[in-house]
Image (tube, rainbow, N blue to C red):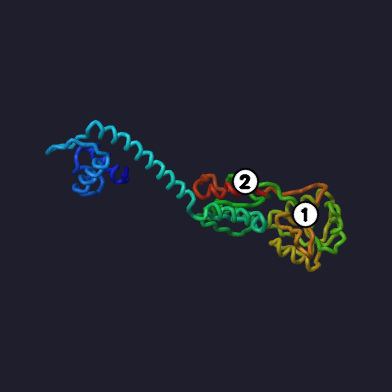
Amino acid sequence: MNFTLRQLQVLTAVARHGSFTRAAQDLGMTQSAVSTSVRHLEAELGLPLFDRDTRNVRPTETGRDLATRVGGLLDDLNNVLESARSTALRRRGRVRIAAVPTAITRLLPPCCAECRGRYPEIDLRIEEMAAEDVAAAVLGGHADLGVLNEGRQDLAPLTATPLGNDIFCLVCPQGHPLARKRTPTWRDLDGQDMVMLDARTGSRALIDAVLRDQGVSVRPVQEMSRPEAVAALVAAGMGIAVLPELAAPTAADRVLVSRRLSKPEAFRHMILVHAPGRPLEGPVALVAEVLVRRGV
């Protein structure tokens, strides 16, 4: 048997209204088209579905039972289609992420790649800024999500979710004496010329605190806001540096080496933030799930 969805819709509409005319008005069809559809359906089944007289159209017992069952199936189909439409809408839209430079260097790229592969309808936009500016952007509604490290900035109004710990590393040229140490300590930095991250990065306060607690004195020779600039100055022979592992050179670097610092192991907490008045939903929730799951 071969039925069309439109024929089944006509069947239920005629049974519901008891009239070809009212069914046609409900479906946006002509009365003759409704009548023809019913005749074709009856011919396909080989059974009468309606008793007709000059004033009314009444379903037969078979027609009434079929209309009831088909009506339930059409309702289920509408629910499935609406669910699919809602899912598609959840995966469409623009998501704005404000992030500190060190997050953009290594944490966000694989997350962005996964989002692009799983949710191609999402327009993901990333803007780099200092930690305090990330918090302000999220609070002000200029960004949907923020990725930064916990520091001295006031995050009280924001809702924060941990992304993991980013350990601090020694970064120095391949030929530097400290490069030979597999597990350098913070005390090994005493007396060294150091290229520093500046105070706006959020990491600087944490680095200064460990140096102070360990009684280590270094000679700052330059302060930079971007870790790439710090690494470039170290590669040029200006001194050594302490960088978060997310921003430190990788093993593929032929000029610099990176070693995790120990005694103590110090790290910064990376977090994902969003404004409490704007619950995570739709494409923002999908992107946030990827960020939290992958983490540091």
| Marks 1, 2: nearer the viewer | 2
Q: Is residue 53 above or below residue 154?
A: above
Question: What residue does disc 2 label?
Answer: 293
Which residue is more in the foreground, 86 or 221? 86
The x and y percentages for residue 230 are 74, 63
> Residue under circle 1?
169
Give me the C-alpha separation between circle 1 and circle 2: 24 Å
Quarter occupied by the N terminus? top left
Looking at the rendered structure, the secondary structure element under dot 2 is helix
Q: Nearer the viewer, residue 87 or 139?
A: 87
**Residue 20: mark in rendering:** none
Residue nearest the observer in this picture, 237 or 205:
237
- Toward the top, the furthest residue is 61
Q: Amino acid at mark 1?
A: Cys
Q: Please give the name of the residue rendered at 21% of the width and 46% of the height, measured from the top-left corner.
A: 36
Q: Is residue 100 left or right of residue 2?
A: right
The residue located at (51%, 55%) in the rendering is 122
- Nearer to me, 201 or 285: 285
Q: Is residue 248 above or below residue 36?
A: below
Left or right, residue 92 beside residue 34: right
Amino acid at circle 2 = Arg
State the SS at label 1: strand
Residue 86 position, x and y percent, is 44, 46
N-terminal-most mark, 1 or 2: 1
